[in-house]
Amino acid sequence: MSKSFRHGQILKLIRARSISTQEELARALKGVGIEATQVTLSRDIRELGLVKTPTGYREIEREEPPQHFPMLAAEFLTDVRIAQNQLVLRTAPGHASSVAVALDDEEWPEIIGTIAGDDTILVICPDAATAKTVHGKLIRLLE
């Protein structure tokens, strides 16, 4: 089990419910198949920048990331196509990764995830109707 996967699961758990102690966090992680010691959890909590509040562990509020995606999309996105529940975005060569990271940072709830190559991004949505909605958002953004 990689540290980044464990960190992702910790964030997912504390966002979904109130977890007030490391013991509760260890039990919740065990419930999703991840064993972690108290020492590991202490380090994870510190590395993730979590704070303990009266309602449980929370992420420290981060500044809103700059709105890079609209700028990058306008400059590098060359095509947007729907393929069932997925979209295929074409970019100028060498720019797919930076555009995909910027799209991920937008945290659109309609997008499950992205995969980027050199000039192509695969955007995965839960269903075809949602992919059509995302397609519309992207097209409007490029107008």
Image: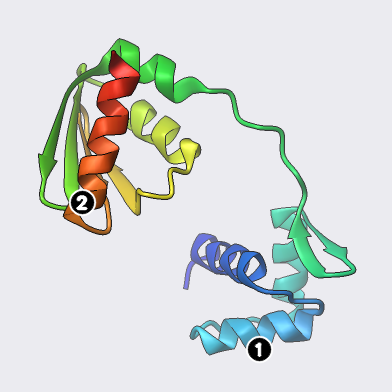
Q: Is residue 96 visible?
A: no
Q: Is residue 39 visible?
A: yes
Q: Is residue 89 above or below residue 13?
A: above
Residue 4 position (above or below residue 124): below
The structure residue drawn at horizontal position 57% and vertical position 88%, both measured from the top left corner, is: 30
Give residue 133's quadrant in the image.
Answer: top left
At x 28%, y 13%, the residue is 143
The residue carrying mark 1 is 27
Estimate how packed mark 2 is, as few (under 14), some (14 to 19) or many (20 or more) residues with alpha carbons within 10 Å.
Answer: few
Q: How many marks?
A: 2
> Residue 10 location, x and y as percent?
61, 68
In the rendered view, tell whether residue 32 sits above or below residue 96.
below
Residue drawn 42% across and 15% down? 71
User: How far apart, in angstroms, are the residues tagged by discs 1 and 2?
Assistant: 37 Å
Of helix, strand and loop, which one carries label 1?
A: helix
- Point out residue 8 in the picture as x, y percentages from the top left corner: 54, 62
| Residue, disc 2 | 129
Quadrant of the rendered structure where residue 28 is?
Answer: bottom right
Q: Is residue 7 left or right of residue 26?
A: left
Residue type at mark 2 is Ala
Position above or below: 14 against 75: below
Q: Mark number for residue 5? A: none
Q: Give 105 or 143, whichever is nearer the viewer.
A: 143
3 lies left or right of 91: right
Describe the element under mark 2 as helix, strand or loop. helix
**Is 129 placed left or right of 31 in the picture?**
left
